[in-house]
Image (cartoon, rainbow, N blue to C red):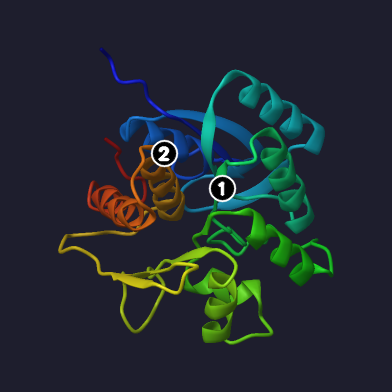
Amino acid sequence: MKYERPYVLSIAGFDPSGGAGITSDSKTMEALKCVGLSVCTANTVQNDVSFKACYWTSMPIMLDQIHLLFERFPIGFVKIGIVENWLVLDTLLTALLLQQPTVKIILDPVLSASTSFLFHADASNDKNEFLDRILEKIYLITPNFNEIQGLYPDKNIEATIAYISSKTHLFLKGGHREDALGKDVLYQSNGTLVEMLAADGDYSEKHGSGCVLSSAITSYLSHGFSLETACLKGKRYTEKVLSSTTNLLGYHG
C-alpha cells in the first residue's frame, strides 16, 4: 500500500530565480515527501542577487485560490512568506481559519529583500494591534535576528522574544547573529527553550535559505513530528541545501 503524502500549502511570492518563495517552498516540500500547494502573493522581478520590483496579487484572487484548494484537499499546515502588509496578512489568516479552524500556520515574516526592498512599507499605523492579533492566530513564527528586531521596535530583543513567545511558538534563526552564528533557538509558548547548534559542514550563503527552513519545518510538522523535532530536522535539511553548492542557488533532494 502506497503512503499518501500530506498536503502542505505555501502562501508566498514568486521568485523567477527559484531560490526563494513558492518555487523554493515547492522544491522543499517535494523533497520531503509532501504535496506542495501554493497561493502566489506577489510576482517579483528578481534573481539571486538583485531585486527590482514587486507586483502584489489582489486579495479576491488569493481568497478564491485558498477557498478552492481547501475545498479539494485536506490541508493541515500552511507556510506564509511575503505579504503586502499586516492588514493583508491578518485577512489571509482569518480566511484560512474559517476554511479549517484547526489548521496550523507557520509564518516566515519577510520584512525586506536582501537589497532592502521593504515589503511592509505601507502598513497601517496600528502595526502592533495587527501583530498581536496575528500572533494569536499562528502556530509558529520564524524570524531571523534582523527581522525580530523590526517586529516590535519599541522593545529590546529580550522583551520582544518574551512577548512573542507568550503568544505563540518562536523559532529564532541564528544566521545573522554575531555572538553564535548558526545557533537557532526554539522558544515554545509553554516556556521551554531549546538551542540548536549548526552541524559541522562546509556551508555557503544561499538565496532563499529562510524560505527553505520554514517550508522544511512545515513539511516535517505535516508528517506528525513534534515541534522540536520538526525544527531540528528542518535545520538539518537547510544545512544540506547550504552545503550543496558554492553559489547562491542550492540543490534540493
Mark 2 lies on residue? 222
Please provide percent x and percent y for residue 42.
67, 41
The residue positioned 74% from the left and 37% from the top of the image is 57
What residue appears at the point 57 percent right and 41 percent down from the top-left corner? Answer: 103
The amino acid type of the residue labelled 2 equals Ser
Q: Which residue is outermost to the left?
A: 200
User: For this view, does 36 lie left or right of residue 152?
Assistant: left
Relative image position of residue 55 (x, y in whole percent): 72, 42
Residue 18 seen anywhere in this rendered image of the structure: no
5 relative to 100, above or below: above
Residue closer to the observer: 183 or 163: 163
Secondary structure, mark 1, is strand
Determine whether 138 is above or below 38 in the image: below
Along the polypeptide, which appears first: circle 1 or circle 2?
Answer: 1
Which SS class for mark 2?
helix
Could you say which is closer to the camera, residue 209 or residue 148? Answer: 148
**Disc 1 marks which amino acid?**
Ile
Please tell me which residue is depicted at 50% across the width and 45% down the height of the picture: 47
Count of numbered circles in the view = 2
Query: Dot 1: within a 10 Å radius of its alpha carbon, few (fewer than 14), some, or many (20 or more) residues?
Result: many
- Please indicate whether residue 241 sits to the left or right of residue 112 in the image: left
Residue 18 is labelled as none
Q: Residue at x 28, y 59 (%)?
A: 204
Q: What residue would you read off at disc 1?
A: 105
Give the x, y percent position of residue 33. Answer: 33, 30
* Image coords of residue 156 (percent x, y): 58, 87
Q: Is residue 180 left or right of residue 161?
A: left
Residues at marks 1 and 2 touching, judged by CB atoms closer than 8 Å: no
